Amino acid sequence: MLKINDDIEIADWELSESFTRASGPGGQNVNKVSTAVELRFEAARSPNLPAHAKNRLRGLAGRKWTKDGALVIQCDETRSQARNREIARERLAEMIRRSLERPKRRVPTKPTLGSKRRRMDAKTRRGAVKAMRGKVRGDD
C-alpha cells in the first residue's frame, strides 16, 4: 500500500516491480546483483485516482506513460536495491500528488499604454538607424 495523501492510497495490485542489473559504479557487484528497479503503476485502471488526475498524470509522465495506460518509473541511482525501490516509490507518489493539484487559471492581461509607446519608439529609432545605412550620393 502506497499512501499518497489522506484520501488516496495506491493498492499493491496496481504496482509491479522488476529488478535488473544497473549500469554505473559498483565494481564486480554490478555484474552480479540486480539493483536497478522498474516500477510499473497501472494508472489507467486505477480505481483510486480521479479522472482529472489521470489526465494530468498522463501529461506529467510524458515518455514514461505506456500505450496501455501504465506509468513506468526506473531508478538505478544507488547500489542498494531497497533504496532504489524507495526512490522509485517516492517519485511515483510525488508525480501523483502533482497531478492532483489543479493548475491556476491564467488571467489574460493587456500591455500597458507606456509599454506600447516604448516599443514603437524603439522600432522608430531602429528604423532610422537602418535608413542611414543607404548609399551615399555625392553632389559633384
Image (tube, helix red, strand yellow):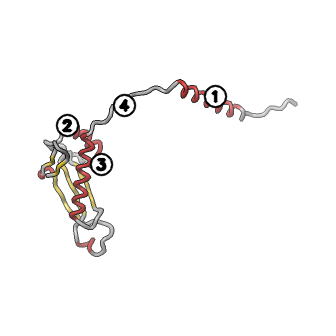
**Which residue matches tag 1?**
124
Which of marks 1 and 3 precedes in the sequence? 3
Task: State which mark lies toward you, 3 or 1.
Answer: 1
Q: What's under tag 3, amino acid-wise?
A: Arg
Residue 106 disc label: 4
Residue 63 disc label: 3
Question: In this rendering, is residue 97 above or below 25?
Answer: above
> Residue 83, how many percent across, how many down?
24, 62
Q: Is residue 2 visible?
A: yes
Question: In this rendering, is residue 51 above or below 75?
Answer: above
Q: CA distance from mark 2 to mark 1?
A: 52 Å
Residue, far front: 6
Q: What's under tag 1, amino acid-wise?
A: Thr
Which of marks 3 and 2 precedes in the sequence? 2
**Which residue matches tag 2?**
51
Q: CA distance from mark 2 to mark 4?
A: 22 Å
Q: Residue at x 27, y 39 (%)?
A: 101
